[in-house]
Image (cartoon, rainbow, N blue to C red):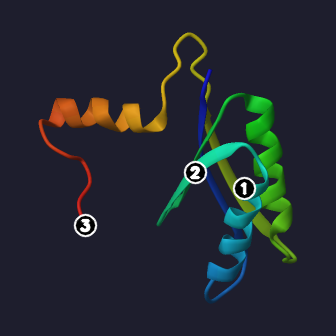
């Protein structure tokens, strides 16, 4: 089974959050997850929900701030093993083209 999630961890501060976000992303490296960071968050894939939640907790705790805001959306499709890339490919098939634009 593959669990896919969208994670956003950020301190509640004014100015750049890049260093704190980098700490949260780096914390994921200590876990058996794959991830891809984008401008709005990080998509994480794990083999099970417990591994995912441990990684998310570490990312949240890695931000050293008085207040931290964490958003987590989990897709735990239990009957089919589907990777995040496969979800994008299904949309691209429907579009008849790549969904990504630079």
Q: Mark 2 points at which residue?
A: 35
Specify the farthest residue to the bottom. 15
Tell me the quarter of the picture where residue 94 sits: top left
Query: Tag 3's secondary structure?
Result: loop
Q: Position of residue 66 (x, y in %)?
A: 87, 77
Distance Cα–Cα, label 2 vs label 3: 20 Å
User: In x, y percent, where is residue 11?
Assistant: 74, 73
- Mark 1 Cα within 10 Å, few/some/many (few <14, many 20+)? many
Q: Earlier in the sequence, mark 2 or mark 1?
A: 1
Q: Look at the picture and state if 2 lies above or below 15.
A: above
In the image, is 88 to the left or to the right of 52? left
Residues at circles 2 and 3 in contact by the CB criterion of under 8 Å: no
Quarter holding the C terminus? bottom left
Q: Looking at the rendering, which quadrant does residue 47 occupy?
A: top right
1 or 3: tag closer to the N-terminus: 1
The correct choice, above or below, for 89 with respect to 11 in the image is above
- Relative to 90, 15 lies left or right: right
Above or below: residue 36 compared with residue 4: below
Query: Mark 2 falls on what kind of element?
Result: strand
Judge depth for marks 2 and 3 and give the one in front.
2
The mark closer to the camera, 1 or 3, is 1
Q: Name the residue under label 1.
A: 28
Q: Is mark 1 on a helix, strand or loop?
A: helix
Gap in angstroms between the C-alphas marked 1 and 3: 26 Å
Asked whether disc 1 touches disc 3, contact meaning CB atoms under 8 Å apart, the reply is no
Which residue position holds label 3? 102
């Amino acid at each position: 089974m593959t669990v896919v999630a969208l994670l956003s961890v950020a301190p509640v501060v004014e100015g750049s959050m890049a260093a704190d976000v980098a700490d949260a992303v780096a914390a994921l490296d200590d876990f058996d997850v794959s991830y891809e960071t984008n401008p709005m968050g990080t998509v994480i894939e794990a083999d099970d929900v417990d591994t995912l939640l441990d990684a998310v907790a570490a990312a949240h705790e890695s931000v050293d701030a008085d207040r931290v805001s964490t958003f987590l959306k989990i897709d735990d499709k239990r009957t089919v093993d589907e990777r995040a890339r496969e979800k994008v490919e299904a949309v691209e098939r429907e579009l008849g083209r790549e969904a990504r634009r630079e």
